[in-house]
């Protein structure tokens, strides 16, 4: 017998859902239902500049229209900011983060000056400028109230762990067909931001804390987040959390092979619904995508 899985669908309310989101929700729910487990809905609304309560309400309405019901109350990340902040403060107290005063353009200039900037899956990584700041400069900038983000110091995390995690368990397939135990490459995304300059926390921090707090056993999500799993696994280890397993799924693409995005208005659930497509027809399209 398979163990009961706790899965989740975790959309950001920056718009309504499109077919790609529905696919993700449908897969996560199916994994929970077929194992006798739980399917959770989490609204990832820490980005107060881009997220809107009316989009969250619309997402809920669209999931209900599709019949993709979830278990328990909806979790809103915006209601847990104090938890994220206190975990971040604890990591900082352990010397596992550093303040980063760089603006986007300063980072771009620094990368342009470098002979060989470290590369990630989506381009150059943060070159670590503020990790190398001397203590006096750092302290005086902090004392002056200079705006800053908080970055995870990957090297310090690896030093603090008696043994780094081997990797993470992929039960689906990564973008390159990877499956099974994926060896940990903690620096894949570089020293990521844990505390954004504007809202004080970040996606990576919140998602790791939430998956732990909600008892998620199987993280089902698009393969675009496969690379992020490396650093999220490292964060779980330094926070003392056990690791969920992962099932990354292919993204739904348009006729020209591009992943669906907000520009693909024809593939939004709102447009499909308005044109008379039934929930059963939408679910059938998701099934065919398998
Ligand atoms: N909120 C993220 C998104 O909408 C998903 C996060 C996750 O599944 O880990 O892309």
Image: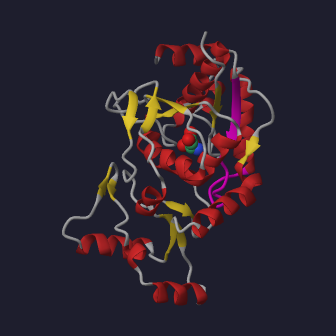
Tell me: residue 33, above or below residue 139.
above
Is residue 75 shown left or right of residue 244? right
Image point (62%, 61%), residue name? 201
Image coordinates for residue 272, horizontal then vertical, percent: 60, 26
The foreground one among 77 and 285 is 77
Tell me: residue 33, above or below residue 261.
above
Image coordinates for residue 90, horizontal then vertical, percent: 64, 63
Image coordinates for residue 161, horizontal then vertical, percent: 48, 53
Identity of the residue furthest to the right in this view:
73
Let me know if residue 145 appears in the view.
yes
Identity of the residue furthest to the top in this view:
1
Image point (54%, 53%), residue name? 238
Is residue 24 shown left or right of residue 173? right
- Which image quarter has ligand 1? top right
Image point (62%, 40%), residue name? 11
Image coordinates for residue 243, horizontal then vertical, percent: 55, 38
Write down the region rendered in magenta.
38-52
What sort of colour scheme is used for the picture? secondary structure
Image point (48%, 34%), residue name? 222
Let me know if residue 43 appears in the view.
no
The foreground one among 152 and 276 is 152
Residue 207 within the magenta-colored segment of the rendering = no
Tell me: residue 287, above or below residue 165.
above
- The quadrant in which the N terminus is found is top right
Is residue 145 shown left or right of residue 120? right
Q: Quadrant of residue 132?
A: bottom left
């Amino acid at each position: 017998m398979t163990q009961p899985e706790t899965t989740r669908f975790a959309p950001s309310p920056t718009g309504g859902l499109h077919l790609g989101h529905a696919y993700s929700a449908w897969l996560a729910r199916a994994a929970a239902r077929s194992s006798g487990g739980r399917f959770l809905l989490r609204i990832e609304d820490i980005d107060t500049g881009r997220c809107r309560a009316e989009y969250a309400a619309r997402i809920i309405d669209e999931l209900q229209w599709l019949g993709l019901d979830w278990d328990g109350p909806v979790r809103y990340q915006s209601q847990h900011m104090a938890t994220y902040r206190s975990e971040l403060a604890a990591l900082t107290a352990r010397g596992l983060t550093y303040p980063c005063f760089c603006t986007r353009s300063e980072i771009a200039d620094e990368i342009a000056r470098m002979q060989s900037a470290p590369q990630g899956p989506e381009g150059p990584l943060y070159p670590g400028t503020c990790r190398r700041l001397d203590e006096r400069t750092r302290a005086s900038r902090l004392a002056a109230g200079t705006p800053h983000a908080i970055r995870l110091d990957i090297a310090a995390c690896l030093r603090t762990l008696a043994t780094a995690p081997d990797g993470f368990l992929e039960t689906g397939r990564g973008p390159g067909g990877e499956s099974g135990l994926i060896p940990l490459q903690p620096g894949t995304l570089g020293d990521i931001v844990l505390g954004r300059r504007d809202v004080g926390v970040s996606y990576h921090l919140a998602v790791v804390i939430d998956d732990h707090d909600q008892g998620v056993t199987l993280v089902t999500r698009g393969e675009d987040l496969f690379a992020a799993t490396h650093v999220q696994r490292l964060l779980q280890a330094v926070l003392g959390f056990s690791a969920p397993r992962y099932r990354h799924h292919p993204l739904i693409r348009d006729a020209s092979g591009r992943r669906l995005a907000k520009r693909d208005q024809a593939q939004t659930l709102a447009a499909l619904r308005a044109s008379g497509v039934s929930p059963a027809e939408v679910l059938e399209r998701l099934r065919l995508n398998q």
